[in-house]
Image (tube, helix red, strand yellow):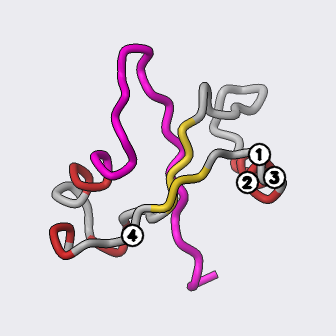
Amino acid sequence: RWQERPLALVVRREDSSISAEELREWLSSQVARWWLPERWAFVPALPRTSVGKFDKKVARRHYADGELPVETVQQTSASS
């Protein structure tokens, strides 16, 4: 599990066209470098449980089945 890296699931606003690179650049000033996701998936909605919590099991299954449109953004010197 220590080798796992975060995957960011992002729901864009209807009027937004922000990219994974732009999000990573902004986030690099907000959190520690090792928390920065390298993989991003833009989805219409987050999977929820019956009580409204984020459903990690469903998200992981969608990722494992290749159902998420994942973009990879490598660390650059600007975000180091």
> Which badge, 3 or 4, comes first in the chain's sequence?
3
Residue 63: horizontal and vertical position, in percent? Answer: 73, 54
Q: Which residue is mark 1?
A: 67
Range drawn in magenta: 1-23
> Which badge, 4 or 1, comes first in the chain's sequence?
1
- Could you say which quadrant of the image residue 52 lies in? top right
Q: CA distance from mark 4 to mark 1?
A: 21 Å
Q: Which residue is mark 4?
A: 74
Q: Decide: few, some or many residues near mark 3? Use Cα within 10 Å; few <14, some 14-19, many ≥20.
A: few
Q: CA distance from mark 2 to mark 4?
A: 19 Å
Residue at the outermost top position: 15
Q: Which amino acid lies under the numbered mark 4 shown in the image of this protein?
A: Gln
Residue shown at 64% from the left, 81% from the top: 1
For the residues bearing labels 3 and 1, Cβ distance under 8 angstroms: no
For the residues bearing labels 2 and 3, Cβ distance under 8 angstroms: yes
Q: Nearer the viewer, mark 3 or mark 4?
A: 4
Residue 45: horizontal and vertical position, in percent? Answer: 61, 27
Residue 57: horizontal and vertical position, in percent? Answer: 77, 50
Instruction: Give left or right: position of 50 versus 45.
Output: right
Instruction: Give left or right: position of 20 versus 68.
Output: left
Q: CA distance from mark 2 to mark 3?
A: 5 Å
